[in-house]
Image: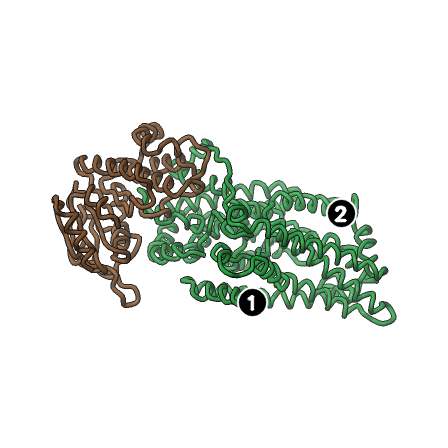
Chain colours: A brown, B green
């Protein structure tokens, strides 16, 4: 589904990302781990054409993201709060995203009903704009909006950070459910090794922009990763 | 104090859009110099009793009385309402400073005292000084009295200065003042009632009676004290700096549905204007622009037809020059989101063009009856100016938007004093070619073929622009695609 070829990103002679080749198959749940500055967000940004890689290219379903915009119809993402429109109410925001993905209001309402648990009564039907929600609730809005309209590629940067434990557990369940669906590719990054190993079936470890480990998840994966990070 | 200045200096020079900022600063300084010379010239001419430059010989017996009789109006137009739009409120990124070991009073006084030396105030004082020097002669005036009169005026100036800071969170007061001004001006224009004798009586008193200087001093001291108190009380993180929570109400804006796919975006832009204070102030200002032509209508004999045409260009294009000049900055907070959605970049840009044309059409519809009232001469001029704005200036603004890269913080209560200034010197820079182009065309054509043909020539270019909409937008989008990445990174920057 996603193919990364010879990608590098250099800021002022400092290379922050250098990946020769990385293929993510359709239907995979892909976890990205690494310390701060490892290049996780840079990689995701390049994938969404938000930064211009110094060299190389990203193909999303065979489409070069730099030259065509067709990938936008089946890809969705939530990277940070810049993916929210602060002056809208959560409902208005969901409908807006729905409209862009050809979902009617009714379809959006129906879709949102499955997240009642996650929203915990704090998001829908309130009298607040997104800007007045708490950080955690804002995140919930952004993540759920990224799932509207049956996207085939979903990119989530640090989805578990800032969330309370209950929500984290519910979110993990949602992501696991997504990966059960045929043809849905989920890309998740995290600092938290446990979270990410729990939801993904393939894990890539980045360190200073380089791929250090690329492993299929087994029972031993979490232990492996933990020992890697303790070593240093 | 020095530390605070250093911080502002750093935030300027370390900004990623430094080049643009410097260009804007240079433009700002050039316009300052222009205004400086205009002020000196005007003060000199007024002091010599000339009403304007064109009339050479003195036609006013006593310029001092004339100034006094107009003082009240000028104070309100320039010092109160003009200042509200033109002068930025002092802003310091205050939150991180509050926890440091800088005295809170010091921060407040620093930001307030900075305004004392604002260009706006200095220029007003300069005018008064030059005016006074020009009129002064030992036979006619008493030096002490004149100096005290001057002092009183400076104090009044600074009363309006601090009042403006205080009022900056209250749109309503300014709207009310604006409406009163228009009424007062209309009453005077149609010779129903004139406030000039009252104004003359009040302000001449400051000259006649030396002791009266105390009144503005007391009021000034009181205003300064009030403003300081106001900020002191609002300077805790949990009160003044916290965003005001406005009760949200969903609105579906069904009437926009007729615009098809574009309605999705137009709806959000309407909500933005409704819900963000800064967007609202800017949109409001573009409404006021509609009346701008009246200034040139009143002085047509003096300044000529071309200046009147300029006025009409501004009247119908106000929304483009103010609000749209900050497109796509209004979306700066969620620009990366927009870039990832299931929408072509060109459609997004197109929706912004529709927004601009919406503004032009509304302004033209409002302006037509106002100016059409004075005859078909004005009717056709307004209509053609509207067309030009619709078909040419809207694109130019949009194209320049690719380079603006100013981040707008919509939830701006983070700054204690609220970042509500509607004007941006960078965006004003662009209005120059947008004005010069049609003006030159109109001037040349109308000189040879008369007013009507002159208007039509400008208007037909506008129509051409509308007809070739898709072609022009496709050219514009290329620039946007090139600038996309640096725009995204500029929007990521705080401050």
Q: Nearer the viewer, residue A72 or B475?
A: A72
**Residue B423, image x and y in percent?**
54, 54
Using the image, tell me which numbered label, if any, was put on residue B30. Answer: 1
Which of the two discs, 1 and 2, sits closer to the camera?
1
B33 left or right, relative to B96: right
According to the picture, the residue beneath numbered tag 2 turns out to be B188
Mark 1 vs 2, N-terminal side = 1
| Chain under disc 1 | B
Q: Position of residue B26 (x, y in %)?
A: 51, 67
Vertical side of A3 occupied by B150: above or below = below
- The percent coordinates of residue B14 (x first, y second) are 42, 65
**Who's the residue at 21% across and 35% down the image?**
A177
Is residue B444 visible to the viewer in this orientation of the structure?
no
Q: Which mark is residue B489?
A: none
Is A24 in front, or is B346?
Answer: A24
Quadrant assignment, res A184: top left
Asked which secondary structure carries label 1, the reply is helix
Percent position (x, y) of residue B299? 69, 55
* Residues at circles 1 and 2 in contact by the CB criterion of under 8 Å: no
Label 2 chain ID? B
Q: Residues within 10 Å of mark 2 (few under 14, many from 20)?
A: some
Question: Residue at (37%, 34%) from the top-left corner?
Answer: A95
Q: Is residue A94 above or below residue A24?
A: above
Q: Are marks 1 and 2 on the same chain?
A: yes
């Amino acid at each position: 589904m996603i193919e990364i070829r010879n990608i590098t990103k250099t800021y002022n002679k400092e290379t922050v990302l250098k990946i020769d080749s990385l293929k993510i198959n359709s239907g995979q749940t892909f976890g990205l781990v690494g310390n701060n500055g490892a290049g996780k967000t840079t990689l995701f940004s390049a994938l969404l054409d938000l930064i211009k890689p110094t060299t190389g290219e990203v193909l999303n379903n065979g489409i070069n993201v730099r030259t065509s915009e067709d990938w936008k119809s089946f890809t969705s993402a939530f990277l940070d709060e810049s993916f929210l429109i602060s002056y809208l109410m959560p409902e208005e925001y969901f409908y807006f995203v729905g409209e862009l993905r050809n979902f009617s209001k009714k379809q959006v309402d129906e879709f949102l009903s499955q997240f009642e648990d996650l929203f915990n009564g704090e998001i829908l039907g309130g009298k607040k704009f997104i800007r007045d929600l708490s950080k955690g609730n804002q995140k919930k809005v952004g993540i759920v909006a990224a799932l509207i309209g049956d996207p085939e590629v979903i990119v989530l940067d640090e989805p578990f950070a800032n969330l309370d434990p209950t929500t984290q557990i519910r979110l993990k369940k949602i992501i696991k459910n997504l990966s059960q669906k045929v043809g849905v590719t989920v890309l998740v990054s995290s600092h938290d090794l446990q979270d990410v190993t729990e939801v993904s079936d393939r894990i890539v470890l980045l360190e200073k922009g380089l791929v250090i480990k690329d492993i299929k998840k087994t029972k031993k994966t979490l232990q492996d990763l933990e020992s890697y990070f303790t070593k240093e | 104090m020095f530390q605070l200045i250093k911080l502002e200096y750093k935030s300027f020079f370390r900004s990623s859009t430094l080049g643009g900022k410097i260009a804007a600063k240079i433009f700002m300084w050039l316009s300052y110099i222009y205004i400086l010379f205009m002020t000196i010239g005007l003060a000199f001419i007024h002091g010599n009793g000339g009403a304007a430059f064109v009339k050479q010989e003195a036609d006013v017996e006593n310029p001092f009385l004339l100034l006094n009789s107009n003082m009240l109006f000028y104070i309100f137009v320039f010092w109160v309402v003009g200042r509200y739009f033109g002068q930025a409120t002092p802003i310091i990124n205050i939150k991180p400073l509050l926890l440091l070991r800088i005295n809170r009073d010091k921060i407040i006084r620093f930001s307030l005292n900075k305004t004392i030396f604002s260009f706006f105030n200095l220029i007003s004082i300069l005018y008064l000084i030059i005016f006074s020097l020009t009129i002064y002669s030992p036979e006619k005036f008493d030096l002490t009295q004149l100096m005290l009169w001057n002092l009183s005026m400076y104090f009044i100036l600074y009363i309006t200065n601090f009042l403006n800071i205080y009022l900056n969170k209250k749109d309503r007061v300014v709207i009310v003042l604006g409406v009163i001004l228009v009424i007062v001006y209309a009453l005077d224009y149609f010779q129903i009632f004139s406030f000039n004798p009252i104004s003359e009586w009040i302000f001449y008193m400051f000259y006649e009676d030396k002791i009266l200087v105390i009144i503005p001093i007391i009021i000034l001291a009181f205003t300064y004290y009030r403003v300081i108190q106001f900020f002191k009380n609002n300077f805790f993180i949990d009160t003044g700096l916290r965003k005001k929570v406005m009760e949200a109400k969903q609105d579906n804006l069904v009437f926009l549905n007729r615009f098809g796919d574009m309605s999705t975006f137009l709806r959000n832009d309407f909500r933005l204007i409704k819900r963000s204070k800064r967007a609202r102030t800017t949109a409001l200002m573009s409404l006021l622009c509609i009346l701008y032509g009246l200034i040139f209508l009143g002085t047509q004999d003096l300044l000529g037809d071309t200046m009147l045409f300029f006025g009409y260009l501004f009247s119908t294009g106000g929304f483009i020059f103010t609000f749209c000049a900050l497109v796509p900055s209004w979306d700066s907070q969620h620009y990366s989101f927009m870039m990832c959605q299931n929408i072509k970049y060109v459609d997004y840009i197109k929706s912004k063009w529709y927004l601009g044309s919406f503004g032009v059409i509304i302004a033209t519809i409002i302006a037509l009856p106002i100016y059409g009232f004075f005859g078909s001469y004005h009717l056709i001029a307004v209509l053609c100016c509207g067309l030009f704005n619709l078909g040419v200036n809207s694109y130019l603004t949009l194209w320049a938007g690719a380079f603006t890269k100013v981040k707008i913080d919509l939830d701006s209560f983070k700054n204690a004093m609220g970042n509500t200034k509607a004007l941006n010197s960078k965006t004003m820079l662009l209005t120059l070619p947008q004005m010069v182009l049609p003006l030159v065309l109109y001037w040349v054509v109308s000189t040879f073929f008369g007013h009507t043909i002159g208007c039509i020539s400008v208007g037909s270019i506008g129509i051409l622009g509308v007809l070739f909409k898709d072609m022009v937008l496709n050219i514009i989008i290329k620039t946007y695609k090139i600038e996309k990445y640096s725009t995204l990174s500029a929007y990521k920057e705080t401050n």
